[in-house]
């Protein structure tokens, strides 16, 4: 999703009557990832270099289309004005919102401040931040927050996922939206916390209403992934086909998952 910078901002009257916050969390887990190249499944991949910017355009364009399909029955036209990409990397999400009338703040880790130059060169706004701390902004400023694998990274740093959700709740306007895309176990854990914030989960809620069963592939029983565990839809489909053919998870995983992304097998079960 992308935006051309504008001066629009959301102002909040501190004396307005209290409202019940109902924010929508679009929890798109790895099984729902769009058909993107395996190395592009994580915006924080080591392959993300300036030379990869052009290749990322189509990938992020597809992702944004997918997001809007999920949200089209939940939002009103032009209801998004201020957007934040909380883990912007090279600004691919924002660049894909160029034709939409929104303003996007791209946030990159303070340890990767060099990526800001690329973001600025693309005509986008950006800043650095450590999400283990509060973000310097007024409360209820943003209409939409995008968190791509951010919770996994925060967890690696030993910081609190709950604190990050509370911070998102602080900067997100009432009836705003958050797109949280992460590993299945992380998304499942986050989903359990949403009721306490009076947020609603769209994707998982719809799947439950439609009686669609979900499950987690037993990758951890056979492999130590050397990079992101997020797989494309095509990869998941191929793994399932191979398992049906061989009745062997290890064979299915090793047949589909590239060697550069997998470690040694842990068990032979």
Image: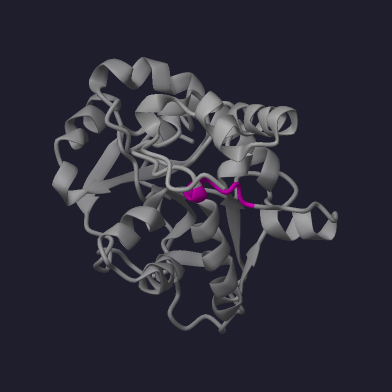
Q: Is residue 20 above or below residue 81?
A: below
Residue drawn at (67%, 47%) of the image: 71
Farthest residue to the front: give it.
268
**Residue interval drawn in magenta:** 216-221
Left or right: residue 225 versus residue 123 is: right
Left or right: residue 99 versus residue 198 is: left
Residue drawn at (61%, 79%) of the image: 20
Q: Quadrant of residue 151?
A: bottom left
Measured as percent of width and height from the top left, residue 237 is found at 67, 30
Measured as percent of width and height from the top left, residue 208 is found at 78, 59
Q: Is residue 73 above or below residue 154?
A: above
Q: Is residue 19 above or below residue 263?
A: below
Measured as percent of width and height from the top left, residue 16 is found at 52, 80
Measured as percent of width and height from the top left, residue 209 is found at 83, 60
- On the question of residue 182 being in view, the answer is no
- What is the tally of numbered marks visible in this picture? 0
Q: Is residue 15 above or below residue 234?
A: below
Residue drawn at (38%, 55%) of the image: 152
Along the viewing direction, whichever of 161 and 185 lies nearer the viewer: 185
Left or right: residue 40 versus residue 180 is: left
Q: Quadrant of residue 199?
A: bottom right
Residue drawn at (36%, 51%) of the image: 86
Farthest residue to the right: give it.
210
Colour convention: one colour
Along the viewing direction, whichever of 93 and 195 lies nearer the viewer: 195
- On the question of residue 69 being in view, the answer is yes
Does residue 135 belong to the magenta stretch?
no
């Amino acid at each position: 999703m992308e935006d051309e910078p504008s001066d629009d901002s959301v102002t909040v009257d501190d004396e307005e009557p209290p409202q019940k916050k109902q924010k929508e969390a679009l929890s798109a887990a790895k099984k729902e990832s769009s058909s993107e190249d395996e190395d592009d499944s994580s915006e924080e991949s080591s392959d993300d270099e300036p030379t990869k910017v052009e290749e990322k355009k189509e990938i992020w364009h597809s992702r944004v289309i997918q997001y809007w399909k999920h949200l089209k029955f939940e939002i009103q036209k032009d209801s998004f004005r201020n957007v934040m990409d909380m883990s912007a990397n090279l600004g691919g999400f924002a660049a894909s919102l160029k034709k939409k009338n929104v303003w996007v703040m791209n946030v990159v880790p303070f340890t990767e401040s060099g990526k800001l130059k690329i973001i600025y060169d693309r005509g986008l706004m950006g800043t650095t931040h450590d999400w283990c701390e509060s973000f310097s902004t007024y409360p209820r400023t943003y209409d939409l927050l995008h968190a791509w694998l951010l919770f996994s990274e925060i967890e690696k740093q030993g910081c609190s996922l709950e604190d990050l959700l509370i911070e998102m709740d602080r900067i997100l306007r009432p009836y705003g939206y958050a797109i949280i895309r992460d590993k299945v176990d992380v998304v499942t854990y986050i989903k359990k916390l949403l009721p306490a914030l009076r947020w609603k989960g769209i994707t998982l809620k719809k799947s439950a209403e439609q009686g669609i069963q979900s499950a987690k592939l037993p990758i951890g029983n056979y492999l130590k992934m050397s990079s992101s565990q997020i797989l494309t839809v095509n990869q998941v489909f191929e793994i399932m086909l191979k398992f049906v053919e061989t009745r062997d998870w290890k064979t299915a995983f090793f047949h589909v998952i590239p060697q550069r992304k997998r470690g040694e097998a842990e068990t032979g079960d």
